[in-house]
Image (cartoon, grey):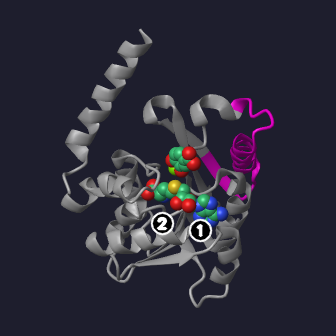
Amino acid sequence: MQQQNEQRADLIGAYVRELFVPRDEVLDGFEQELERAGIPLIQVPPELGKLLGLLVRLMRSRRVLEIGTLGGYSAAWMARALPEGGRLITLEKSAKHAEFARSFLARAGVVDKVEVVVGSALDTLPALLEREEPQFDMVFIDADKESYPGYLDWSIRLLRPGGLIVADNVLRGGKVMEPGDDAVLNGVAEFNQHAAASPLLDSLILPNRNGQDGILLAVVREQQ
Ligand code: SAH
Ligand code: DHB
Ligand code: MG
């Protein structure tokens, strides 16, 4: 029964991708390239990449921040959805991942729109406040889960009123409901609680990956 459900869910996933995620020479080769480079295959699935692009457009974004670049897959989806002159800043701790991402993003045709910043995000985020244009329309959080609560605070500081936070991996197979003493699960559970309770935000979790994980969406309330 369980196996039948999983097979059916896989078929449904394939149906959605077939209909709504167009073939793309560069994006479709990503996973194989990542594997060859010995980098973990933990990028968002194609339909979540597509959703991130739709959200960039829906927000009429000109400036997007990503925390956790990996090889640049989600970054490519978001950067491609930006208008002319739009900018994506993406933060990555691993110099190896950042180098891979720069080369991948060049091939994806968005190198002019993306800046990959190397360093641990909690160390590189403060400098964003000092930039000429410090406000973002959207933030995608997808780096180390222990730091999610810190990333939430920074996102609120860096987003414009009405700006959007999207965070990946907020359900972890439902394990966030009983985090025990696991640092990853506690980071995510605290993040979810803060997002839900913050008077500055209006938030919801959408389950995805066949219900095995979820994304959190939060809009920064406009000033009353
Ligand atoms: N958004 C990517 C996947 C990101 S995976 C995609 O969907 O294509 C998580 C990434 O966060 C990894 O590359 C990891 O090296 C990076 N990371 C982990 N801890 C970090 C930190 N403290 N600061 C910045 N990046 C970090
Ligand atoms: C992991 C991280 C992710 O961002 C993800 O989407 C899946 C797995 C991980 O660290 O294992
Ligand atoms: Mg993720």
* Residue under pointer 1: 93
Query: Where's the N terminus, which quadrant?
Result: top left
Outermost residue, bottom side: 132
Q: Tell me the SS state at disc 2.
A: helix
Q: Looking at the picture, how far across and down is residue 80, in whole percent?
A: 32, 68
Specify whether tag 2 is near ligand 1 (CB below 8 Å).
yes
Q: In this view, does 184 lie to the left or right of 132?
A: right
Residue at numbered disc 2 = 97
Q: Looking at the image, which is closer to me, 26 or 151? A: 26
CA gap, disc 1 and disc 2 = 8 Å
Splitting the image into 4 quarters, where does residue 129 fall? bottom right
- Assess whether mark 2 and mark 1 are in contact (beta carbons under 8 angstroms): yes
**Residue 188's quadrant in the figure?**
top right
Q: Nearer the viewer, residue 218 or 178?
A: 178
Q: Which amino acid does label 2 sit on?
A: His
Question: Magenta segment, which residues?
Answer: 177-203
